[in-house]
Amino acid sequence: MSTAAEPIAGPVGTRRISMSQSMYHAATMARRGLLKIKHNPQELFDVVALPVVFTVMFSSIFGGAIAGTVGDYLPILVPGVLVQVAVAASVNTGVKLREDMNKGVFDRFRALPIARIAPLAGSLLADMVRYAVATSMTVVVGLAMGYRPGSALGLFVACLLVLVVAFSLSWIFALMGVLMDKPSTVQGVSMLVLMPLTFVSNALVPVSTMPAWMQTFAQLNPVSHLVTAVRELADGHYGHEIGISLLGALTVLAIMAPLTVRVYLRRA
């Protein structure tokens, strides 16, 4: 993130921005994103509606076939939906970023005496609220339907893990938002990538029920590792899948964050 300290040409002249100032500017831009949500709550519609639709629909369709009853299926389903909804919500980062860039909002930010990275970082930080709403709604709907985790603390830690993973993935979609020309293109390509990742996994059904060639993909799928980690935590267990998911998230963040910042600064 050292790029945040590059010179900024603005009405107050050329000067360098310190790291603390860059963090303050990013926080200010994050507040701007939160205010947009406050004045337009419809932006939260997907992360509020999807957990309800997915949990009710999938439990009704697969519950009897996989676990015998809906109640027995919920410990399998709720962690899967928790991951699916949060991962899908991270796509919005790239879509909104491209919309702002097309409207010229970021061009106006360039004229301000702020860190050039602040608008991008602020946008990603504000979207953490969306991920928090998505995970909270999934848990609330699951509890309302009869889901009872083995460990409330473990479930809370699982939600934090999902938030970390969603934030790391948002950098991938932010890069797509910077590189692509239309929000619809970002949305379409992102969902094309996410559909096989989220559904060809152990999120909804046991991997053993899949064809042999698909089992290999599902077992290697990072979504499967994350879902397993969430299930382990919700049951009060702390297995190696948790470390794998966290390491994967940090690796994605370490690679994609500098790359996205670099491309963003060049395009800006």
Image (spheres, rainbow, N blue to C red):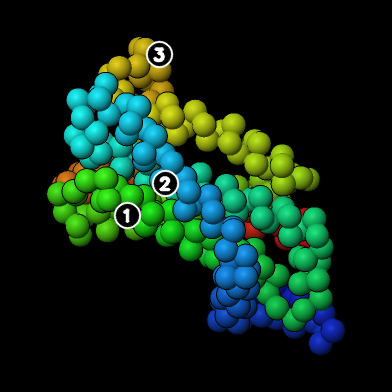
Q: Is residue 122 visible in the rendered structure shown here?
A: no
Residue occupying the point 37% across, 12% down = 211
Q: Nearer the viewer, residue 4 or 199?
A: 199
Residue kind at label 2, given as amino acid type = Pro
Above or below, comparing residue 33 to residue 82 in the picture: below
Upstream in the sequence, badge 2 or badge 3? 2
Pointer 2 residue: 51
Pointer 1 residue: 140
Q: Residues within 10 Å of mark 2 (few under 14, many from 20)?
A: many
Residue occupying the point 35% across, 12% down = 212
Residue kind at label 1, given as amino acid type = Val
Above or below, comparing residue 165 to residue 24 in the picture: above
Mark 2 touches mark 1? (CB < 8 Å): yes
Above or below, comparing residue 131 to residue 119 in the picture: above
* Horizontal side of residue 254 vs 69, given as left or right: right
Upstream in the sequence, badge 1 or badge 3? 1
Residue occupying the point 81% across, 87% down = 12
Q: Nearer the viewer, residue 184 or 114?
A: 184
Q: CA distance from mark 2 to mark 3?
A: 30 Å
Which of the 4 quarters of the picture holds residue 205? top left
Q: Secondary structure at mark 1?
A: helix
Upstream in the sequence, badge 2 or badge 1? 2
Where residue 213 is drawn, which disc sits there?
3
Q: CA distance from mark 2 to mark 1?
A: 9 Å
